[in-house]
Amino acid sequence: MNQSNILEIRELTKCFEDTAAIRQLDLKLERGRVYGLIGRNGAGKTTLLKLIGGLLFPSGGEIEINSEWIQKQGDIAFGRAYNIKYFTQRIKDILETASYIYPNWKREYAKELIDRFELDVKKYYHKASSGMQTMTSLILALAADPQLLLLDEPYVGLDPVNREVFYDFLRKHYFDGEKTVVISSHMIKEIEGYFERAIMIDKGQLVLNEEIEDLKERSFIVQADAALAEFVERNFNIVGRETLGSRVTYYIYDKIKDSEKNQIYSMNGEIQSMDLQTLMVKMLTGKEKL
């Protein structure tokens, strides 16, 4: 295994009865990178994170972890909004138990998050609000200070203030080029600025695995009239198309050369960048309408 990778996934498959949630998936995660795991509901994102985190066992394929420390200590933390009814202890007791389980537990991280979230740790977990349960889950994952942090829709139930607390904590303690972070998110527009690489899956299969900077250079929205439409259709990879009167909006995943941009402008066309969320929507649904 390449030493720059923290893990490699080969031909990974996970089936639940007759349904394949993950299908022959190959993926590598590099050390110290921040990944965005995106896709529609039911795409297999949570299943993939649980397989990486050891919460599920694969039906086929393998996950090779390139870290003796992770292999020995299980130094992976999984953060997700849970409503675990058998968690009947006070939140402070759950966190105290976790401090003995996780090998790198940082009490100062837990205290910082408790204070900034203004979390009442005397509350019983099963009687707490969904937001307080999410805060507890995030503290468990973040105070564990893992080499590999997996976050599955981590903001569920958090108000805008506490979402910013969460993002600020990640910036301060995790986006350091040392830890590897994978964030599965539906709120892509809010959080995509933190991703270094986007991984898109659909129906358990890998659709896209690209650097964010490369995606920005290949994701465009072009508005054109009939005179320009033939040029656009002939020269670019179109992932979505919308028509309003004589004007057509094209969603393009392709590089556009400067000479091609000049030609589009000269023919009364318009070009703008396409954000990651729009690209995902068009790649997963736009082709169906072409």
Image: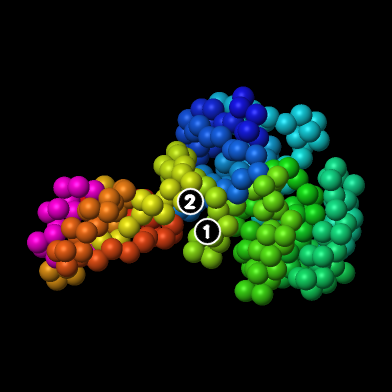
Can the viewer see residue 42? no
Contact between labelled residues 1 and 2, with CB atoms less than 8 Å apart: yes
The quadrant in which residue 71 appears is top right
Left or right relative to 37: residue 71 = right
Up the image or down, 107 lies above or below 119; here it is above
Question: Which residue corresponds to the image point at 12% horizontal and 54% vertical from the top-left?
Answer: 230
The residue nearer to you, when weighing 73 against 255, is 255
Q: Which residue is mark 2?
A: 212
The quadrant in which residue 173 appears is bottom right
Name the element at disc 1. Answer: helix
Nearer the camera: disc 2 or disc 1: 2
The disc placed on residue 24 is none
Question: Which residue corresponds to the image point at 64% horizontal and 52% vertical from the top-left?
Answer: 151
Residue range of the region highlighted in magenta in the rendering: 223-236
- Helix, strand or loop: magenta stretch: helix
Label 2 amino acid?
Ile
- Magenta stretch holds residue 147: no
Question: Which residue corresponds to the image point at 36% horizontal and 61% vertical from the top-left?
Answer: 273
- Magenta stretch holds residue 232: yes
**Dot 1 alpha-carbon crowd within 10 angstroms: few under 14, some 14 to 19, many 20 or more:** some
Residue 90's spot in the image, x, y percent?
Answer: 86, 63
Q: How is the image coloured?
A: rainbow
Name the element at disc 2. Answer: helix
Residue closest to the far left: 227
Q: Quadrant of the N terminus?
A: top right
**Dot 2 alpha-carbon crowd within 10 angstroms: few under 14, some 14 to 19, many 20 or more:** many
The disc placed on residue 192 is 1
Left or right relative to 193: residue 247 = left
Can the viewer see residue 33? yes
Q: How many marks?
A: 2
